[in-house]
Amino acid sequence: MTLESSIRGRYDSTRLSVALGAAILLCGGARADCLCGTAADVMEAERAGLQREWLLQVPFDASTSAIEHVVIDRDLVVVQTGDGNVIAVQAGDQKPGLPLPGTILWKHPIDGDARPFQAAAVGTDIVAVAHGDGIHAFDRVTGLAVWDRRFSHLADAGAAVSGSWVYTPFGDGKMMRLPTNPNRGPQAASEAASDDAGPKPKQAAKPARKKPKTGARRFESLEPRVLEAAGTVSLQPQPFKGGVLWCTEGGTLVVLDPSEDAWRRNEFFLDQAPAGRPLVHDDAIFAATAAGDLVRIDPIADASGSLRLTWRVLLDTRPPGTMFVSGEKLVVPLGQDGLAAYSTKTGDLLWRSAAVGRVVAVAAGRVWLVDRMERLVGLDLETAERRDLFCLGGFTVPVANQATDRLILASPAGAIVSLKAR
């Protein structure tokens, strides 16, 4: 029996009981979380072209705590509660040999006194949670604690996991780099760079034999390393081109990425404080500033890997932060001035809407936002016309999904629902 089949057998019954428990709780005992009139109602969802993919109740003591973070990766949703619980849920499309989407894979508690808990970072092998003055790493599949570290200062933001490394901002202008597996054997720098760049493409045939390289090989140390961050980092770093990207409070973008035999560091100055975390899509960086600049930045395809400005748009307002991409459309919230969509290629304005609210996802051909009346509104992605209107019900935890094409809703008491296009 494989590890995957063992896990699936263990958790299929758990998923069923938890999902049924959620349905009973939401429709019977907890009026605040009633599904009626919400997007989690199967009939209501179908009328909006949505399919309820899964619904579950996260197991924790909702009488003393609430959900604080919901982190979404391609095939994993990580839920964090105020009492320190970290819960991983299988997500994405159903794949052979893996648990059904909506299955709770594992739950692991962290000491509740280790606050504040930062948003988790999901990597290929681990889930990393920065908290207080430390960081915990859990095996992505099993949830087993694999290591933990303490810092001399509080972590300023959540970590980023990229390739073989974990990056955590802490203290005044510092970035801590840790290996995802501190017990692995030593790697040459070129091998580490290759590993961090992602899976190698399949080759049709063996290449011709080349003469071995001569000279000393530089090996990467697995000891924690403190990097200069170029300023205070209060926004969570993120993976970028096999390396990492972060943005300082002063508006300096820093990219650290592996080259053939070393690491390259490049910086780009926004000249203003960032208005929220930059968005990475298809190796491009989209960023907005407090002064109302919206920019696209791309790495130059040469040995330097330096960053260049591709286009700049001057907004007539300060954007509140989180942006979303779907295809070649960049959706930008504009605060009290509504929201707009721009071409990712040229920066041209595609449409503008007066709808005001907090955008939470782009899914099923809609831009989904929570308006000032705490209603869930669906705008047509092509025309910005309003198509759908739902009661939000108990799903009041702000969950912004920039990673997938799902609409994820959560209640403070632990109800989580995933909706996708029919």
Image: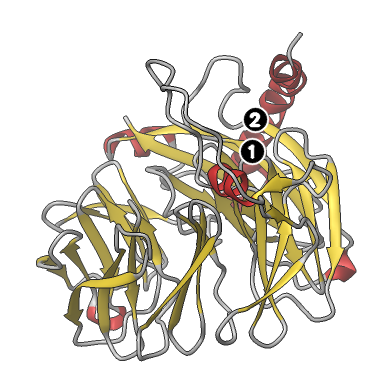
Q: Quadrant of the C terminus?
A: top left
| Residue occupied by mark 2 | 103
Q: Quadrant of the N terminus?
A: top right
**Where is residue 255 shown, x and y percent of the image?**
47, 68
The foreground one among 228 and 324 is 228
Residue at 44% from the left image edge and 17% from the top image edge: 206
Q: Element under label 1? A: strand
Residue 110 falls in image quadrant: bottom right
Q: In this rendering, would 340 be left or right of 179?
A: left
Marks 1 and 2, how far apart at CA: 6 Å
**Where is residue 61 shown, x and y percent of the image?**
81, 53
**Where is residue 32 shown, x and y percent of the image?**
59, 55
**Where is residue 297 shown, x and y percent of the image?**
29, 69
Residue at 53% from the left image edge and 36% from the top image edge: 75
Residue at 20% from the left image edge and 56% from the top image edge: 329
| Residue occupied by mark 1 | 89
